[in-house]
Amino acid sequence: MIKRNLLVVGFEISLLFSFVVGYYRDKTCAELQVNNSSVICVCNATYCDTVTREEPHPRRFMVYTSSKAGLRFKKFTSILEVFDLCKVTECSTTLELEPRKRYQTIHGFGGAITDSAAINWSNLKDEELKQNLIESYCGDSGIQYNMLRVPIGGTDFSPRFYTYQDYPERDKDLSNFTLAPEDLNYKLPMIKACMKASNDSIDILGSLWYPPAWMKSTKKSNGISFLEEEYYDALALYHLKFIKEYYKQGVPIWGITTTNEPLSGITKHANDNVLGWSVYGLANWIVNYLAPKIKRYDPSIKILGVDDQRFTVPLWFNAALKHVPELGRAIDGIGLHYYENELVPPEIVDRCFKNYPNLFVLSSEASIHSQTNNKVDLGSWDRAEKYIKNIIEDLNHNYTAWIDWNVCLDKMGGPVLSKTYLDSPVIVDPDAGVFYKQPLFYAMGHFSKFIPKGSKRIQSVEKYNCGDPIKHVAFSTPMNTIVVVVFNDKNKEKVVRLKLGYSQAKVLLEKNSIATVEFHNDVIDESCDCEK
Ligand SMILES: *[C@@H]1O[C@H](CO)[C@@H](O)[C@H](O)[C@H]1NC(C)=O
Ligand SMILES: *[C@@H]1O[C@H](CO)[C@@H](O)[C@H](O)[C@H]1NC(C)=O
Ligand SMILES: *[C@@H]1O[C@H](CO)[C@@H](O)[C@H](O)[C@H]1NC(C)=O
Ligand SMILES: *[C@@H]1O[C@H](CO)[C@@H](O)[C@H](O)[C@H]1NC(C)=O
Ligand SMILES: *[C@@H]1O[C@H](CO)[C@@H](O)[C@H](O)[C@H]1NC(C)=O
Ligand SMILES: *[C@@H]1O[C@H](CO)[C@@H](O)[C@H](O)[C@H]1NC(C)=O
Ligand SMILES: *[C@@H]1O[C@H](CO)[C@@H](O)[C@H](O)[C@H]1NC(C)=O
């Protein structure tokens, strides 16, 4: 009895505590209700919502919630209770956390600085407004991205076709290799602004979409094409020169992929600026040209294979390794894209990694592409839900990082060469002097902000859920805290107990909400004293 009363008092104090401590450092979302969707948060030059991480007090837990109803990183704190087995009924959903059972180490989260993203960021003009966007993504009061993907040259999200050496042609030494105005005026300044705002090192992943047209079988930027074999070495050199030029600009490259979506270059997507590969051709190029050149220059630079949809793993991974077994040692890991993930379950990735435990897998691209007119759907919670479910699934299948596509776009979802407009977590509106943070932004932030580099996924087993499971993933962080992300996709509230040893955090999940919970990894070693 006494214990229970103390818990109630503690709970009330904690409410007061959360009111006093939880809010004062943050600016709340300047929300705009968009039709029947969820809210968007409006940032202008003088105001932009922030989220700071609260260090959890011993024996307490912190909860951050975002919901369809409009909560955005709403903070709540309460005390860890003694886990009381006697009170567990058939339907008290419980996640049993086991920090001693560890899986992959997390590398990070991020997005892509494409030409479109960087140009539209730059078009915001006002320095304070631009800085608010950077701080939102990279700063301590933002969602703390620590990875960025940067295209090596142009992509479908560029205003024009270009490469770093369109002329002279047939010059295998690439004597006229030059970064583009898009790099110097837009992408590099945006990357550097993020590096400056971040308290963490930012790891940059470079990806090639297409080489100079003169290296291709068709001599054209788009259309079904392959790399001419006489230019295999020149394309490896092209990557090395990119790495060196970015380094000179003060932006070291952490890793490169081995060509973005090579399947697109031999299929219907070939209208874009792409490069097609045969399975053997790509594996041979990586093993005999790309990897030796890059690793000789700097063995710490990561080389990531596949960089295509999950369903292509049997092609660019399984079949490639069969033809060229050395590929397993030439690459450090693989990048997989989010699109069409429903076509193949993530188990396909587990299976291929059984034989290659030294390789890692990360998600190298994601975005919402809609067949309807709503290319950009302001306030869409459904789209946030798609990301959340996918990120949880991927992390539960040993993915080490998750990288989104364009960090910002304009209200059209462009501009693009191929006219396939997309949605983005941040939509800029320079005429109004604002940008909007979409639900997608908060979906990313519930992971990126609270699962720092070096965190390890731990076992979390769901019990007593009455056949109504929730999505969840749990980590142990370098600060010796436990972080659990739980997602309630139902239109009703739900109580979830996060059980660690004999302690539990009892969390009320709002309807249609995502919650990130954090507490210290110190188990209260006390068993329950009820009489049975
Ligand atoms: C949302 O409402 C605005 C007017 O407030 C309207 O212009 C717009 O078309 C609506 N969007 C959708 C997707 O219904
Ligand atoms: C808004 O409501 C209409 C009618 O109920 C529905 O068809 C549409 O999908 C809803 N849009 C969103 C974004 O929820
Ligand atoms: C910026 O946003 C804040 C919060 O919504 C608002 O109070 C302020 O008036 C806005 N400033 C301008 C110049 O629109
Ligand atoms: C975004 O950038 C492109 C240039 O690539 C430009 O055409 C477009 O107008 C920009 N949109 C806004 C809203 O600035
Ligand atoms: C070198 O590249 C630049 C564009 O970056 C181009 O203007 C120039 O003509 C090229 N030089 C030669 C010799 O082709
Ligand atoms: C920034 O990083 C330093 C050291 O890595 C750490 O001590 C400090 O608390 C961090 N600042 C914030 C606001 O997290
Ligand atoms: C993840 O990696 C571990 C080894 O670190 C392995 O035991 C497990 O089967 C892998 N797959 C999944 C889905 O956890």
Image (cartoon, rainbow, N blue to C red):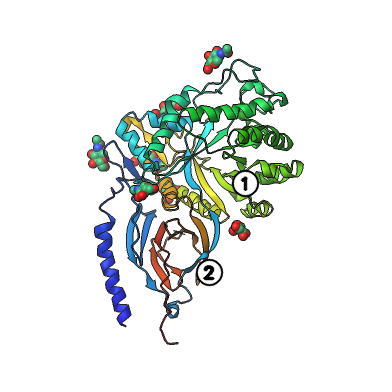
206 left or right of 352?
left
Name the quarter where the C terminus is drawn: bottom left
Relative horizontal placement of residue 168, taking residue 439 as reference (left or right): right
Q: Which residue is situated farthest in the right direction here?
A: 323
In this view, 49 is above or below 14: above
From the top left corner, tell me how far across and down residue 181 is, in percent.
47, 22
Tag shown at residue 467 = 2
Packing grade of label 1 (10 A; few <14, some 14-19, many >=20) is: many
Residue neighbourhood size for the residue with mark 2, other residues' Cα within 10 Å, grouped as few (<14), some (14–19), many (≥20):
few
Give the residue displayed 76% in from the left and 41% down from the top.
Answer: 323
For the residue labelled by badge 1, is the local secondary structure a helix, a strand or a loop? Answer: helix
Q: Find residue 136 and report its horizontal and vertical position in percent.
A: 36, 42
| Relative image position of residue 195 (x, y in whole percent) | 41, 37
Ligand 7 neighbours mark 1 (CB distance < 8 Å): no
**What is the three-letter code of the residue carrying label 1?**
Arg
Q: Are marks 2 and 1 in contact (CB under 8 Å)?
A: no
Q: Which disc, if any, is residue 310?
A: 1
The N terminus: image quadrant: bottom left
Q: In the picture shown, does residue 125 fall above or below 514?
A: above
For the residue pair 209 and 378, the one nearer the viewer reads as 209
Q: Is residue 285 above or below residue 348?
A: above
Q: Does 95 sit above or below residue 181?
A: below
Mark 2: which amino acid?
Gly
Give the spatial CA distance, label 2 vs label 1: 29 Å
